[in-house]
Image (tube, rainbow, N blue to C red):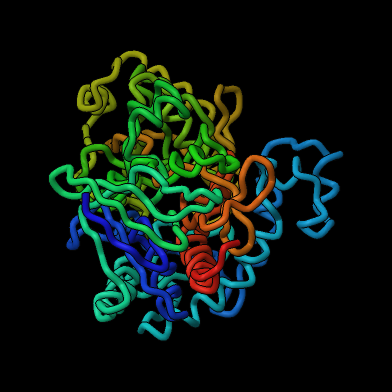
Amino acid sequence: MHDSSFDVVVVGCGIAGLSAAVMAQQNGARVAILERAPKDERGGNTRYTESLWRMKSVDAVSEDFLDKFAANAGGWPDPGIVQEAVLDRDCQPRVLRSLGVVDPQVVAAIADDAPKAIAWLADFGIKFDDIPMYFLSQSTTRMGPIGGGLALVEALGGYADRQSDDIKFFYETAARALIIDDTGRVAGVEAIGDGNVPLRITGSNVVLACGGFQGNPEMLSHYVGPQSQFIRPVSRGGHYNRGEGVRMALNVGAAPCGDFGSFHAQPVDPRSMDMEPVVMNYNLGVLINDSGKRFTDEGPAMVDATYEVVTRLIMGERNGIAYAVFDASLDEVENWNVTVRSRVPPMQGATLMELAVEMGVDAQEFNRTIDAYNAACPSSDGFDPLVLDGLSTTNVNPKKSNWARPIVVPPFRAWPVICSNCFTFGGVKIDEQARVVNTEGDIIPGLYAAGEVAGLYYRVYTGATSVMRGAVTGRMAGADAALRRNSTS
C-alpha cells in the first residue's frame, strides 16, 4: 500500500474540488486531489456544462434566489422544530441541527459568496456574461462564464498544475473509505488507484467533492426506483460520479440532506452523442408516449421553470420514452432551433401515419390522439412562444395550457425524448463553512462536503445554481480546511 500525507485531501476535480484545492493552497495548505478520471477527462460534470449561474449581475444573485430555495427546502418540516432556526447554531437543539432540510444560513452564505466567487475566478482569467441559452425565453436571470464549465476546469486546473510543489493530483484514483483517528477526527482516505492498487492518503482535513451518484445504477435503483434503468447521466462526466463521497460521509455518521429519491432531470435525445443534447421545444408541440397517447400538459408555464417536472413524467412512462411531435408550423417560430441541442435529425413523415411508423408507436392510437388534440385547440390568433399566451385546449385530457396549435400541416416531425440525470439531490448536511454535520447535530471534525455531495435540493432543482454551489462551497471548504489544518477541533 502506498502512503502519502498532506494538509488537505480533496476528493474530486470538478468545480467544487478544484475550488477547494486552489483555495486551500492559496491559504498555505499542501493539497492532494483524487480524481477518478484520467487527466484529459478531469472535471466531472463541470467539464461538460454551460455553467449557468442564477445571477442578475456579477455583483448579485437573481431577485428570486432566496425565495426559490425557501419554497423548496424540504417537504413539510415540523414547525415546532424549525421555529428555533432563528437561534444561533450553538443554541439550536440537536434535532434541528441535524434535520434533513436545507439550512437557510447555508443558502444565505451561497448568495453572499457567489459574487465573491466570480471576482475570485476573474483572477484566473474567467469572464462572466450573458451567454446563449437553449430557452427561447426565461423566467429568471442567468449568467455564465465565457467558455462554460470547461473554461473553469482549464483555468483552475491549469493553476493547480503549475503549483506542483503544493498540489498533487492522483488521477484514475477513487476514494473508498474515510480514515478516522482515535479522537473521532477524519484523518484521510483509503483509495484505489490504477490496477486496483490500494492507497492511503492522509491529511488534517478531507473535502468530499466527488459528485452525486448519477453514475451508479445500484444507488439509483435503491433511491430512485426501478424506472432509473431508463435514465442516464446527461454528460460523460456524470458517469464518473458513483456516490462514494455520499456513502463515505454517511458511513461515518453524517446527517443526510437533500432529496435522495430525486435528481435534476433534463429531456434529451437518446440517439445523440452530443454534449447535453436537450430537446426543449416540446411545449410548442405535443408529447406522445410509446403507446401513442398524450400524458401531460406540455405547456403549463415557461419551459425553463417546468421542464424538470415534465421530464420526470417522461421517465415514468412505459420504457421511459416519449416523442415531441410537431407539424411544419414549428418553422414559423423564430430561432426555435436553439432549443434542440441534438444534431441527429428528427423523425419525419409526409403523413401522421408515416411518422407513427418512424416512431414505432401504434398508428391508430396516435391518429386518434392527434385528432382529439386538434379538435380541442383554439384559434391560433395570439400565439406567442415568448410568453404565456393562454392558448389552451378545451374538452381534452390532459389539457394543454399554453401554445396549443393544431398539428395539421405536413411534413410532420418528432424527436424521441428520455429523462437524463444531471446530478442527484441526496447528499449530506453542511454548515456555512461546508463542514459536515453528523446525525447528532455536531460537526464531524476534519470533514467537509462541497458541490453535489452537499445536499441542497428537494423535488425541483433551483435552476442555474449547481456550479455556483460547487464553486462557493468548494471555496468555503478549502479556506476553512486550510485554516484548521493544524487544529485538533
Q: Position of residue 365 (x, y in %)?
A: 36, 14
Q: Locate residue 301: give its quadrant.
A: top right
Q: Is residue 467 visible?
A: yes
Q: In this rendering, is residue 268 above or below 103?
A: above
Q: Residue at x 32, y 56 (%)?
A: 201
> Closer to the camera, 187 or 42?
187
> Closer to the camera, 466 or 6?
6
Q: Residue at x 60, y 61 (%)?
A: 489
In the displayed structure image, the side of residue 395 where residue 17 appears, left or right: left
Q: Locate residue 98: give its quadrant.
A: top right
Q: In this rendering, is residue 52 above or below 455?
A: below
Q: Locate residue 357: give its quadrant.
A: top left
Q: In this rendering, is residue 288 above or below 389?
A: above
In the displayed structure image, the side of residue 292 where residue 376 appears, left or right: right
Number of labels in the image equals 0
In the displayed structure image, the side of residue 213 where residue 308 appears, left or right: right
Q: Position of residue 200 (x, y in %)?
A: 30, 52
Q: Position of residue 259 (x, y in %)?
A: 56, 38
Q: Residue at x 41, y 32 (%)?
A: 287
Q: Residue at x 60, y 42 (%)?
A: 255
Q: Is residue 475 visible?
A: no
Q: In this rendering, is residue 337 above or below 297?
A: below
